[in-house]
Image (cartoon, rainbow, N blue to C red):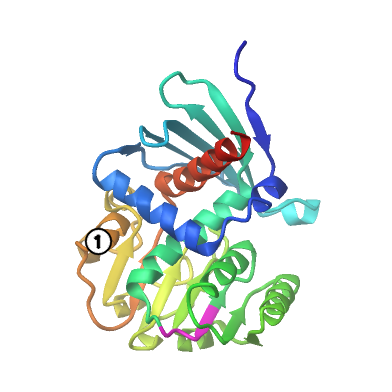
Amino acid sequence: MAFVPKVLDDAALKALGIGAGDVVRVIEKTVLEVADGRLKTTPKSVLQPGDGRYMMTTLASGDTAGVTVVKAVTVCPDNPGRGLPSITGAIMVLDAFTGECLALMDAEWITGVRTAGLSAVAAKHMADPASRVMGFVGAGVQARSHLDLFMQLFPLERVLVSGRGQANIDALCAFAAEKGLESEVVEASDTLAADIVVTSIPITYSGDPFLDARAMKPNGLAIVTDAAKPWPPEGRSGFNTVIVDDVAQESGMPEPVVPVERISGDLTALVSGKATLGSGPRAFMFRGIAAGDYALAAHVWTMCLDRSS
């Protein structure tokens, strides 16, 4: 009889209790598997129909965990008005050797955690370990995911919040208060006074950019999850070091976040100690890579196997 795949919704994934340390560990491990050829990945594919939606897929396959992971996600800006999350999709886990479908998973939780996890892996190597103030430009799902993870890794005391939606701003500040952190709502430019700044405005943003890296703290780190939409090209010159998630993937983009010759390395080089980090403000600019989705989905599948044995 054919194997019946498991179906894991976001509630079930959250209930597994995967902590910040595990997220960083499995993503670092997976990035190194890419470096030594044990994990094969493709660049993410993207479709933008022109009506505000943003669709993407990732694909990765590895022999260590013995699975292939395929993710399809759509960012739908109008979804909150429909009572739905703005990021929706699914992840399919297949047997790497037989192709059988082993599990179907909701994509919202894994996407949020893997994005924050990629950021955390970069911050582990790029940020001041004594960082106490974190700034957010954009107060939605990604802001909360990043705060939830980073507060477990850095001695945070205070957050600076800038956003357009009051409900999201209030929710992020309330979450910070629950965790014992002070919060202050500020103008976007004022977030640059933080030790670590996360920008996560909608990827479909079409207004003028409004942040200048030249105003950042000398040892500040910017985590840029939104294709650098809020950072004008001339302002990005203030970043002395720019790390991306995948140099080859970024080089193939119609509009790289910075000129390719300004990229200091990617996540694989950073984790393996091959990237050169200069002094002054730094940035991790990334679009998401298949290795991040693979890391969390494969880890979840392994946990399910362990618990059922």
Residue type at mark 1 is Gly
User: What percent of the width, then of the height, locates residue 307?
Assistant: 61, 40
Residue 51 appears in the picture as rendered: no
Q: Quadrant of residue 205?
A: bottom right
Specify whether 241 is left or right of 224: left
Considering the numbered disc 1 on the image, is that residue within a helix, a strand or a loop? strand
Residue at x-position 23% and y-position 66%: 262
Q: Is residue 60 above or below residue 242?
A: above
Q: Quadrant of residue 304?
A: top right
Q: Is residue 28 magenta?
A: no
Q: Which residues are magenta?
A: 130-135
User: What percent of the width, then of the height, locates residue 73?
Assistant: 57, 43
User: What percent of the width, then of the height, locates residue 275?
Assistant: 22, 64
Q: Residues within 10 Å of mark 1 (few under 14, many from 20)?
A: many
Is residue 47 or residue 135 the one in the foreground?
Answer: 135
Is residue 204 or residue 75 the one in the foreground?
Answer: 75
| Residue furthest top in the image | 1
Q: Quadrant of residue 33?
A: top left
Residue 97 appears in the picture as rendered: yes
Quadrant placement of the C terminus: top right
Q: Is residue 134 magenta?
A: yes
User: What percent of the width, then of the height, locates residue 103?
Assistant: 59, 31
Residue position marked by numbered label 1 in the rendering? 265
Is residue 62 or residue 119 the one in the foreground?
Answer: 62
Residue at x-position 25% and y-position 63%: 263
